[in-house]
Amino acid sequence: MTATSARPAVVPAPLERRSPLPVFTKSLTDSWRSLVGWSLGFIAALSLYLPIFPSMSGNSQMQDLIDSLPPALTRTINYENISTGAGYAQSTFFGLMGFLLISIAAISWGAAAIGGDEESGQLELTLAHAVTRMEVAVQRFAALAVKILALAAVAFRMVLFWNGPAELDIDAANLASTCLLFAGHALVCGSTALLCGALTGRRIWGIGGGTAVAVGGYVFNAVGNQSTDLAWLHALSPYYAAYGHHPLIHGADAWTLALFYLAALVLGVLAALTLRQRDVGV
Amino acid sequence: MTLRSSLPAAKAAIEAVHLVKRFGTTVALDGVSFSIARGSVFGVIGPNGAGKTTIMRALLDLIRLSSGRATLLGTDSRNAGPELRRRIGYLPGELILEGRTTGRRLLGHYANISGPVVQGRVDDLADRFGLDPDRTVRTLSKGNKQKLGIVQAFMHQPDLLVLDEPTSGLDPLMQQEFLSLVSEARDAGQTVFLSSHMISEIQQAADEVAILRDGRIITVAGVEALRGSAIRHLRMSATGVGVAELRSRLAPLTGMAELDCRSRRPAQRPPPCSAVRSRRSSRRSPP
């Protein structure tokens, strides 16, 4: 017994175990730094905006200032409702700063997932290993969704944290469904970036496609707000679909939520099918 | 283009039948057929742009053939599943590795996908090449990255190795180490398909060689036959003989293709006369 333990070479060499979902795990572990960075950004933005709400809402001068602005401007930046806590959080964070941050994060992750990886030349070697293209695309899409949901969870926790101290008086259930919408909208932008990256094998097209959905939706919403003649533009705006009915005040419609996640899923599947069809790295 | 009779599917590691690949109007592969016996080393040489990389990428199903088909280890290459890929080790010609992580972590990731990898195998391979696997990939030199790529291809002891210009960036000592790794792989029953633009390397490593040009296989031959048909340039200088006389003596030699005799200027002496000779040895009369 002692002889065999002293000579481990005699024992059959143990095999390193193959972990399930290796591409998914890798995708998550690779981006923990950026996930932490974006989370800090969220925490900073929310901790700058939310605590000053009491001084904004109780201050008639602030409302006078908003009233003195051209109505077209306040409608464009969605600042009509900032006297309530829900309206304030929606106008400053979910509709503006948070929307900007999570869209940038989602689009950059989505564009890098396939298009960026192919452009840099690393996708070729991954695909030469024991995975199918479908697996790579699906697992990277799943990782994208998890990262975006993690960011939305950070937003949820932070708003909930400030809800009492900043006298926001936001209903927790409405906040939860709004955060899901917030993530769903970002996931649609990120999945579009993933799909455009998978179509072209170029990161920049992914960024372009994702940005078109985010910015286009925002612009259509802003222009549609201006008059009833232009309100039809709302139909083209994912941003309006998410925030047009004030989910922080009224709660999010379950169908709207389902629609966002379904759309993201369809985009993800399309990306996988596209990648399956074409030449990689040419 | 098939210059050898096809092997039975079970015996061939790679069976490529009339591979054609077009990129737009460019024809990258123009009907390439070959087969590689299991347990042999097969080399392909050719100038840049001949289609070496395209063949390898098509075999790995990274690019899709316009027509033709390829069978790897008895499985059709098109949309082949993980089971086949696990049995293949691939080294891309233009190796790009993720820079932020360490070599060991990166290898661990690929082992997760294509494993199992025998414990200690990575360290053994890294030791042979003098590679420190715990350094961040970004900080490695080109040659060290190439070593990491070689370890990546060999670590899971695949049945088939597809290596695109594997020694590029390696110093001569490491090239020798690589060649001994290849012959060990052959002795262990693994099949190796490698490309190069250096004939000397192929001559050392391969049992059989295909010469590729403009997307076509010009010839498939054993290494000895290839060596015999190689063009060699010789330069010699002679003293005590005139240009005309030297030319008349050298010109009749068998296999002489081009002959250039000229006299050196008086200032540059010795020698007063030199001959530049290039000869093509014929197969009928060996040198």
Image (tube, rainbow, N blue to C red):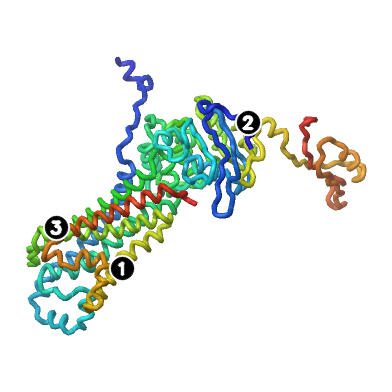
Give percent across and percent down for residue B193.
54, 35
**In the figure, is residue B162 to the left or right of A135?**
right
Say which element carries label 3. helix
- Picture quarter containing residue A60? bottom left
Q: Badges 2 and 1: C-beta atoms under 8 Å apart?
A: no
Q: Amino acid at mark 2?
A: Arg
Looking at the picture, does residue B53 appear above or below residue B75?
Answer: below
Looking at the picture, does residue B36 appear above or below residue A182?
Answer: above
Q: Badges 1 and 3: C-beta atoms under 8 Å apart?
A: no
Q: Quadrant of the N terminus of chain B?
A: top right
Say which element carries label 1. helix
> Where is mark 3, residue-wise?
A176
Decide which of A119, B103 is in the foreground and name it: A119
- Picture quarter containing residue A253? bottom left
Q: Nearer the viewer, mark 2 or mark 3?
A: 2
Q: Amino acid at mark 1?
A: Val
Q: CA distance from mark 2 to mark 3?
A: 69 Å
Residue ID at (52%, 39%): B69
The chain to which mark 2 is attached is: B
Q: Badges 2 and 3: C-beta atoms under 8 Å apart?
A: no
Residue B147 visible in the current orientation: no
Q: Amino acid at mark 3?
A: Ala
Residue A275 visible in the current orientation: yes
> Where is mark 2, residue-wise?
B4
Is there one chain holding both mark 2 and mark 3?
A: no
The chain to which mark 1 is attached is: A
Q: CA distance from mark 1 to mark 3?
A: 24 Å
> Where is mark 1, residue-wise?
A215
Residue ID at (38%, 22%): A9
The chain to which mark 3 is attached is: A
Decide which of B234, A267 is in the foreground and name it: A267
